[in-house]
Image: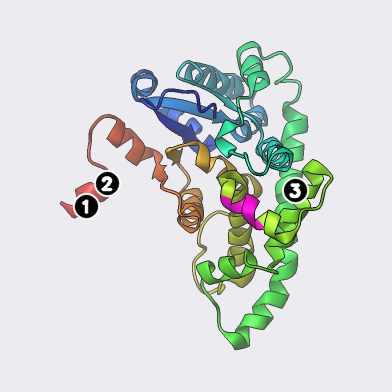
Amino acid sequence: MDHTVSNARKKLIFDTSAINKLGEDSDLDAIVRSLGISYHVGITETVLAEVVAHPDEADRRRLLNILDRLLHPGHCIMPFQWIIEQQAKAYQKNADGYEWRKLNVRFSQGEEEIFRQNIIHEMSEETRTSNKKWDRDFRKMFRAARPAFQKLFETEGRPSLKVVTEHLMSGGGAYLSIGAGLMERATTVLPPEDGVKDFIERCPPFKALLISLCFSQYDTCIRDPRMPSLGKAGRYDMFSAVYLPYCMVFVTNDPGQCKALTAVADLMGQEISILMYKDFKAGLFGLPSEQEIASM
């Protein structure tokens, strides 16, 4: 999100499930008006891609109209992979002076298409097919590794998500190699390990991406299958973590997504409010949340 935006308004991001819930809400008009007072809304390319992929054109147009209304107190944010690529290039160009907040991540092309809808509807089927394939391949990658991890931890016991993440992200860890590969893809230069570590600590979006991958590996491969899932770990669910540093409040209507991103934010040490839609709405209108009511 463009960090020239006034700090007087909190930065807010809805995921697709929250946008869907907002569209069904009888208080939609009042909520949109209230958002403009207190929040600057980020519409991620991930949300836009999922709306574009909606199979029903009437519903698609209805959701796009909601996104258009949200642009008045906000703007679009570029694809997560572009963010990582541009941040890596900025770091390589001037590591000493690198500051991740300086990158303007506004996605003007997305805003234009939400408003004009020139090609969105023609792209719907293709986008839907691509989204399904990418998510299927993402899940398959971790499922393929699951048997070996399950066999390993049958005898050695199962470490916590925090311990596994720290191990994977430590010196010589697998995810430092993955991080180096992502940086090389963006810049054509393979960085040394200390450069990868430095970039991870100085670029929260990149750190969020790697931690979200650690989460997916843990929940899919290492978690005891007798224990409940730690959260929803699909491709778009986890890659939404890249956007967490660009907001103060992230709203979802998916309990699994809420659990997963809360875990990622905790591992990042990032102070972000990950809220379910109903709790966000209650707070917006000054009403107690369900958790607060239960504790009364």
Above/below status of 146 relative to 182: below
Query: Whole-percent x and y of residue 211?
Result: 59, 56
- Asked if marks 2 and 3 touch (Cβ < 8 Å), the reply is no
Nearer-the-camera pick, 6 or 9: 6
Q: Residue at x 63, y 24 (%)?
A: 107
Which residue is labeled 1 in the image?
A: 294
Q: Residue at x 75, y 66 (%)?
A: 144
Residue 128 located left or right of residue 215: right
- Asked if marks 1 and 3 touch (Cβ < 8 Å), the reply is no
- Asked if marks 2 and 1 touch (Cβ < 8 Å), the reply is yes
Q: Secondary structure at mark 3?
A: helix
- Amino acid carrying mark 1 in the image: Ala
Work out whether mark 2 precedes mark 3 in sequence or the reverse, and give the earlier one.
3
* Count of numbered marks: 3
Coloring basis for residues: rainbow
Cα distance, mark 2 to mark 1? 6 Å
Above/below status of 85 relative to 78: below
Nearer-the-camera pick, 266 or 128: 266
Which residue is labeled 3 in the image?
A: 183
Q: Residue at x 27, y 50 (%)?
A: 291
Cα distance, mark 1 to mark 3? 47 Å
- Amino acid carrying mark 2 in the image: Glu
Q: Secondary structure at mark 2?
A: helix
Q: Secondary structure at mark 1?
A: helix
Magenta part of the chain: 197-201
Query: Whole-percent x and y of residue 207?
Result: 59, 51
Mark nearest the camera among 2 and 3 is 3
- Amino acid carrying mark 3 in the image: Met
Q: Is residue 198 magenta?
A: yes
Which residue is labeled 2 in the image?
A: 290
